[in-house]
Each structure stands twice: as structure tokens, then as C-alpha cells.
Image (tube, rainbow, N blue to C red):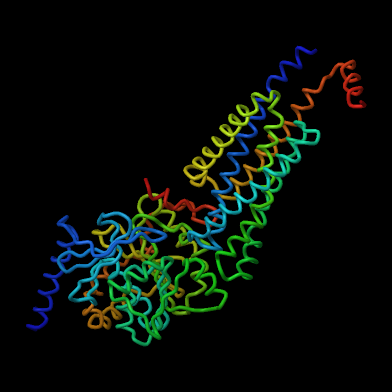
Amino acid sequence: MTNKNNKIQQWQNPLIYLLAFSSGFCIMGIELLGGRILAPFFGSSVHIWGSIITVFMLSLSFGYLAGGKLSTKSASLNRYGLIFIFAGIAILPVAFSSEWLMEAIFLAIEDTRYGSLLASMALFFIPTVILGMISPYSVRLLVTDKNKSGQVAGFLYFVSTLGSALGTIITSFYLVLLFEVNNIITVFSSILILLGLSAMVFNRLNQPTGSSECISRQGATNE
Amino acid sequence: MNKLLITFLVSVLSNVLISAALNTQASAETIHSERSLYRNILVEEKRGLRCLKFNVKSAKTQQSCMLADDPQRLVFNYTKMLFASLLVNPNPERILIVGLGGGTMSNSLHQIFPDATITNVEIDPAVIKVARSYFGFFENEKVTSVVQDGRIFVKRAVLKQQKYDWIILDAFNGDYIPEHLMTQEFLQETKALLSDNGVLAANTFSISDLYDVESATYKSVFGDFFNVRNKKNSNRIILTSEKPLPQDSVIAERAKALTTILRPFNVNITEISRYMKSTAIQQDWPKDTRLLTDQYSPANLLNLK
């Protein structure tokens, strides 16, 4: 029994790295499509990218803060998976509600600088905050040894930023040539939700299944 | 008769000189260069021919040229071909030009139609400055310029229910195409700005795959249109209107009436009318071609192949 658990257990860290990679991929894919989404209402002037990048950086910074805080209380793979599911859901309005939202902002604000800034906020702030929570939470789940914490964090940044790089190039070089913007967003959302679910399933499989272990676990939590 | 012959000879000679100046790699003098928010802007002069260039020093990226001694004579074939629009609507009173370049089109149109209002929309303020300083671009109570993204200008103009008799889309150069100005949604917005007699002329540089999707997208919004091109050029003018396209006899008649008015600008309208081919007669793209929309608009990637 324990043997089997160990076998599953050894896949936990690769799974976390895969999830971190995918979140990096999706964040930059969405950011890149942001320019496309805003262009019909706010144009493609330089300040459009200013708005988008500002909002992504701002929301990631808040996400890091929130993710770090969240990881201090009973961190688990289960909760980690939930972050992905929430992120996947929070992205969906970008595909399905962006039109009327941008139209309302376009009508209310003449200056395309503030119009695009507000539209970026409305569309991308919440999903990007949630996606930003993933990095610090991953560190919490991966680090077991204080001496190796820097190394673990370094490898995690490597993996997630590599994901971002690939998300940028694959989206801009190939995906926009093949698919509609909304379809790409929907696929990103589905990937995040599926990965979140798989983390939760993995967590369940990984739970000690033997009755004795169950009891001992219960004992531990009761203490 | 003699006078006509002389005019003819002079025009042939100057055309030869212009094309020689455009083609030879002989060193051109750079009289101005700057890096704007959007591009590098170069103004070069060579044998009396002054040209505005964007980005790199290749013939492909020339935006606007003018003869220093004879500023009103139009140099580029595509600017001349834009005048085919007058065969569709001979009396434009409200003109919208998206993409300023050197402003030579605006200047010429003001001379031909002094009473028409001309609105130039240009995203890059540096281009407007260069047009004023080096290409004699002028503004007055009839001619104005607005620094704005073309898409935003059009969207706001639709809200204000403005109408134009002639819309010229000239925001595409050989190197980069603003993708949000290629989509079906943009063309629908632009169509909403056309007056009852309104005509739209788009100067485009599409090749291969983009040619097909661009054509299919225009047709989906406007129905059949005129392709105006001569074989010498990679670009073409797409000419569409609110009303059905005019018959050949009407075009011939209008060309006759316009001949003398346009001659000082080096525009041979009869010759240009021969370059007009309606897509109702010949459609040179596949029927099932995908359309460009705000959701799908990889125009620059499609133009690579």
C-alpha cells in the first residue's frame, strides 16, 4: 500500500511543474490576444499595449501577494487545483462578455488611453490575479527543505517563464493563423480547468487508502 | 494641336525621369530622418524627386513622392488610380482620407474640389509634421487632419452619424498592415459612413493568401467591387460604392468630362478607367475563402507567404 502511494507521490512535483508551466503559457497567450481584443474599440496605438501590460503586471503583483498569503493556511494540492479552476472560469468573460463591456467603455470614455486601461482592467484583472497566485502557492507545495528553497523557486520560475515564452510565440505565430480569438481563449480556459481537476483527482488518489492510515490521519488532524 | 503634342512629350519625358529616379540606386540625399512612436520616417531627395519612406531604405516602402519643382503632379501610380473613384462619384463634397502619407492626395483634392471638406486621419503625429514641413501639406477651414487610429475615428464618426461621399483607405503600406482595418466589422462600420452616392477606395498591397481573404471580405460587405490595377504594380485599388457599380457607358462619359480637370495632376483618367475590372465579371479568388473578422485577422501572417 505504502509502496503504491510512494509511486504516485513521486509524480506530485512533476505535476505541479506542469501546472505552473501551463499557467505561464496561458497568461502570456491571453495577454497577447488582449491586443487583438481591444483593437476594434481602442485601436492599435502604442498606449494600448501600455494599458495591457500595466494591467497584467499590476494584477500579477497582487496575485503573488494573495497566493503567498493563501499558502500559509493548510496548503494542499486540492486548493491548488481549485485556483486553476477559478482562473479558468474567470477567463471566460474575456471570450463571452468582452463585446458589450468594451462598447460601454468606448461610449463612456473618449480618450483611448483611459478607455483601454479601464477595459483591460475589467477584462483581465481578476483572471490574472488568480493566475498570479499560482507561483507562490507552487513554491509552498514544492519546498520541503529550507536549504533547497532557492533552487526549487529558481526551477519553478524557469518552468513557468518558459511556459510564458512558448505561450507568446505559439499564440502569435500559429494559433491566430488557425483559430478565432474566442476559441483560443476558450481552449486556454478548458486547459486550466482540466489541469485543476487533474490536480484534485491526483490529490484524492494520493490520499492514504488503508483504514489504519485513515485512522492515524484522523488522529493527527484531531491533535 | 502643337500644344497638345508638347504636353504629351513633356509628360512622357517626365514619366521616364520619374521612373528612372525611382529605380536607380543612385545615392539619394536624406534630408530628414526621425524615429517616431510607430516607425522610422525618412525624407529623401534625388534629382528633384522628394520621397517619404517608412522604416527601411527600400523602394517598396516609399509612401509618397513629390517633384520639388512641380508639387501638384502626382508621381505614384496608385495615387493616380485612386482617381478612378471619381468615375463612380464625380462630385464628392465630403472626403475622408485614412492614412496621410505625405499629404499629397489631400493637397491635390483640395485643388480639384476647393469647396469639399477633406478630413485626414493619421495615427502618427510625426507623419503629419513631416508632411507639413517637407511635402507642403496644408490645412485650412476645408482641410483638416486628426491624430487618431483609423478604426476609432470611423467608430466615433458612425456614432455621430457623419457621412462621407468619398472615403480613401490608405493606411496600408507594403510592409505592415493594420489588421483591425481589414476586418468585416471595420468595413461594415466604414460602409455606414458612406453617403447615398458614397464611394470607397482602398489602396492595398495584398499578395497570395491575403489577396483572397481580403477580396472575399470586401465582397461580403459591399457586394461586387472594382479592382483597379495595372500589371506594373503589386498593389491594387478596391473600389466600392453604396449604389450599384456604374455601367461602362457611364464610366466612359465621366472619364471624358474629367480628362481636362485631371490632366494637370498627371492623371490620365481614360487610361485608368481601362484598369477597372468588376468582380461581377471576373472573380479571381476561391468561393469558400475564409473571411477576415475581428476574431480572425492574421493579415500580416497571410501576406508573408
Residue B126 at what x, y percent from top left?
38, 67
**Along the viewing direction, whichever of B287 and B121 lies nearer the viewer:** B121
Q: Is residue B224 above or below residue B116?
A: above
Evaluate whether residue A90 shows in this view.
yes
Residue at the extreme front = A147
Residue B158 at what x, y percent from top left?
54, 74
Residue A50 at what x, y percent from top left?
53, 56
| Residue B63 position by quadrant | bottom left
Residue at the extreme left = B2
Residue lying at 60% horizontally and 42% vertically, measured from the top left = A26
Residue lying at 92% horizontally and 25% vertically, measured from the top left = A223
Query: Left or right: where does residue B187 sit relative to residue B47?
Result: right
Query: Left or right: where does residue B11 sit relative to residue B154?
Result: left
**Along the viewing direction, whichever of B98 and B11 lies nearer the viewer:** B98
Evaluate whether residue B199 shows in this view.
no
| Residue A9 position by quadrant | top right
Residue A59 at what x, y percent from top left?
65, 50
| Quadrant that contains the N terminus of chain A | top right
Q: Is residue B16 above or below residue A219?
A: below
Residue lying at 60% horizontally and 27% vertically, measured from the top left = A151
**Along the viewing direction, whichever of A212 and B64 lies nearer the viewer:** A212
Q: Is residue A164 above or below residue B107?
A: above
Total labels: the figure holds: 0
